[in-house]
Image (cartoon, rainbow, N blue to C red):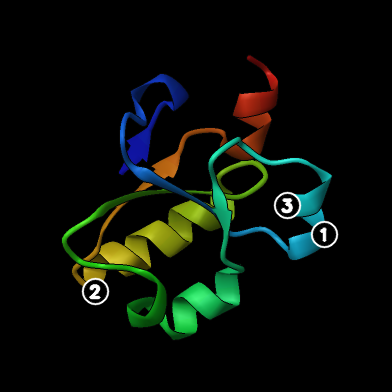
Amino acid sequence: MNIQLNSIGDKIIIDIRSESQYLSGHIPGSINIVENKLLLMPEQYLDKDKKYVIYCDHGYRSYKVSNYLVSKGYNVYTLDGGYQSYLQM
């Protein structure tokens, strides 16, 4: 499910880009969990009782990751437009 930047509210924001991309710029308050780690061990990083917004650079990878995590029972949204939508604000 896609979500707009202005609708994030109190959801936990996760940046799935590489560490170097995250360090180059990220949404304030977001945490960096690289895509592969999140896909391989979601139970290590996520709680099924919490809500998350996942983003990548443009939204395509985060959309795929979000769909997978939702199928595993997690409450996950993807940021529409990814980090680039944040930069356009």
Instruction: Classify 10 Å Cα crowding around label 1: few (below 14), some (14-19), many (20 and above).
Output: few
The image quarter containing residue 1 is top left
Viewer-side label of 3, 2: 3
Identify the disc placed on residue 20: 1
Identify the disc placed on residue 22: 3
Mark 2, residue position: 72
Q: Are marks 3 and 2 in contact (CB under 8 Å)?
A: no
Outermost residue, top side: 89
- Indicate whether 86 appears above or below 83: above
Q: Are marks 1 and 3 in contact (CB under 8 Å)?
A: yes
- Per the image, label 2 sits on a secondary structure element best described as loop
Q: On the picture, is 58 further left or further right than 13?
A: right
Instruction: Classify 10 Å Cα crowding around label 3: few (below 14), some (14-19), many (20 and above).
Output: many
Viewer-side label of 2, 1: 1
- Per the image, label 3 sits on a secondary structure element best described as helix
Outermost residue, front side: 29
| Residue 60: percent from left, percent from top | 56, 50
Q: CA distance from mark 2 to mark 1?
A: 28 Å
Identify the disc placed on residue 37: none
| Residue 25: percent from left, percent from top | 76, 41
Q: CA distance from mark 3 to mark 2?
A: 26 Å
Quadrant holding the C terminus: top right
| Amino acid type of the residue that numbered disc 1 sits on in the rendered structure | Ser
Q: On the picture, is 59 further left or further right than 54?
A: right
Q: On the picture, is 4 further left or further right than 87?
A: left
| Amino acid type of the residue that numbered disc 3 sits on in the rendered structure | Tyr
The image quarter containing residue 41 is bottom left
